[in-house]
Amino acid sequence: MNLARCLTRALAALALALLAAGCAGSSEDLFPDKRTIGVPVGAVGHYGDGIGIPRFSINNQFRGPGILGWGGGGAGDCCVLLPLHITKPILATVRWQTYRDDVDELLEHEATVPIHFAVEPGDSSGMYVHFLPGHQVQVWVSRPYPNSSIYPGPAFPRGPAPSYSPLPGEKPSPQPIKAN
């Protein structure tokens, strides 16, 4: 047997031993409360073109990545903990920023909203945060993904993005220069 094959087998045996040792502890070490489950988080922008969401958080336990103002975004630092079985309404505090580079404007937003449960968290594909026009937000836990035709939450943004319309108190968008 050559040296490379021996090293490969030894490393594989070591990796299996480490995995077995890591699994020897009870699963209660990872999730001490059997009544909760970790659910991945995604985000969808409904604002339009010319605005983005550089960051967001949910209940200060999840920090999401930046997403565009139109369409879907990826997951951030994995998960939020939710009850395994929903027996009463649950609220989420969502904090987010919007940035418009055409006017160099960064705004902070916060909303406490109900989480809409289409299914129990353990039966879901994740939690989805929708950033809607007017700086509104909705949070859904669903089996279908947001881009599915049977998704129960806000319709997924499709097609060309409309231009973002500033709200009162925001900087107006610059007007294009008209050619003579």
Image (tube, rainbow, N blue to C red):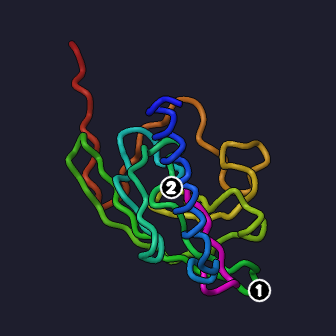
In magenta stretch: residue 105: no
In the rendered image, the quadrant that contains the C terminus is: top left
Local SS, label 1: loop
Report the residue at 24% width, 21% height from top: 178
Q: Can I make out residue 83 in this image?
A: yes
The location of residue 132, given as percent across then percent down, is 52, 56
Pick whichever of labels 2 and 1 is earlier in the sequence. 2
The location of residue 10, given as percent across then percent down, is 50, 47
Up-down: is 121 above or below 88?
above
Q: Can I make out residue 132 in this image?
A: no
Q: Residue furthest front?
A: 1
In the picture, the disc for residue 51 is none
Up-down: is 50 above or below 143?
above
Q: Is residue 103 left or right of residue 97?
A: left
Amino acid of disc 1:
Thr
Amino acid of disc 2:
Leu
In magenta stretch: residue 32: yes
Residue at mark 2: 14
Exactly how many numbered labels are in the figure? 2
Tell me the magenta residue range. 31-42
Up-down: is 113 above or below 174?
below
Residue at mark 1: 87
